[in-house]
């Protein structure tokens, strides 16, 4: 389904679970009927959401005790339209686009299946995409091309990593995505 098709569908609103006075739509929009001091008003105001560090969209709402809480938008949509998250599951984006929070694009699934989806869509933070990585894809190819006896320690010193890291790369126990 394209974004244009999704936008032409009727927008359906449901109450946000645990946040009276807030509603979320099947298009991933949130509106509030809460005014100052938590009193309800007749006309809603549409809430903006924000994207922290270019990751998931978040929305901040006040619960029934007037405590502000921030939740990811895709979880708010899923909870309202599908139900609470089953144990061992998390919210998944079917098309890999974390900015597409239409209900048709969301599902509860296992962590493993979500990770498989992330790899399929190229969104997984593996290899050089991981901010903690000292090595690049080119480094890995170089290390694998030079798999010779006695080279592990030399490679480790060259790239400032532990020799065990080199052996794990050679045996393809790490950096598996670069076959």
Image (cartoon, rainbow, N blue to C red):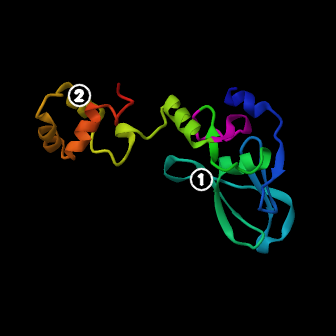
Residue at 70%, 26% (x, y): give it: 1
Measuring from the top left, give residue 71's x and y in whole percent: 64, 57
Whether residue 48 is situated above or below residue 137 in the rendered picture:
below
Residue at 38%, 40% (x, y): give it: 129
Query: Closest to the observer: 80 or 23?
Result: 80
Residue at 78%, 49% (x, y): give it: 80
* Residue 121 in view: yes
Residue at 34%, 49% (x, y): give it: 132
Q: Which residues are magenta?
A: 96-109
* Residue 29 in view: no
Instruction: Please state if 101 lies on the left or on the right of 10 as rendered.
Output: left
| Few, some or many residues within 10 Å of mark 1 (<14, 14–19, 20+) | some
Q: SS for tag 1? A: strand
Measuring from the top left, give residue 83's x and y in whole percent: 77, 48
| Few, some or many residues within 10 Å of mark 2 (<14, 14–19, 20+) | some
Instruction: Name the residue that disc number 2 marks.
Output: 144
Of the numbered discs in the image, which one, if any, rests on residue 38? none
Measuring from the top left, give residue 121's x and y in whole percent: 52, 30
Is residue 83 magenta-colored?
Answer: no
Instruction: Name the residue that disc number 1 marks.
Output: 50
């Amino acid at each position: 389904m394209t974004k244009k098709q999704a936008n032409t569908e009727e927008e359906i609103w449901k109450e946000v679970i645990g946040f009276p006075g807030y509603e979320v739509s099947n298009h991933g929009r949130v509106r509030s009927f809460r005014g100052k001091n938590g009193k309800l008003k007749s006309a809603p105001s549409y809430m903006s959401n924000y994207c922290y560090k270019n990751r998931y969209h978040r929305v901040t709402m006040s619960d029934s005790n007037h405590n502000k809480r921030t939740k990811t938008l895709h979880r708010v949509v899923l909870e309202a339209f599908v139900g609470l998250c089953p144990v061992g599951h998390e919210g998944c984006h079917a098309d890999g686009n974390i900015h597409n929070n239409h209900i048709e694009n969301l599902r509860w699934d296992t962590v493993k299946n979500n990770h498989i989806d992330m790899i399929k869509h190229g969104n997984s933070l593996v290899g050089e995409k991981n901010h903690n990585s000292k090595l690049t894809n080119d480094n890995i190819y170089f290390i694998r091309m030079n798999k010779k006896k006695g080279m592990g320690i030399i490679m480790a010193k060259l790239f400032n990593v532990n020799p065990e890291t080199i052996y794990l790369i050679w045996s393809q126990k790490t950096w598996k995505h670069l076959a």
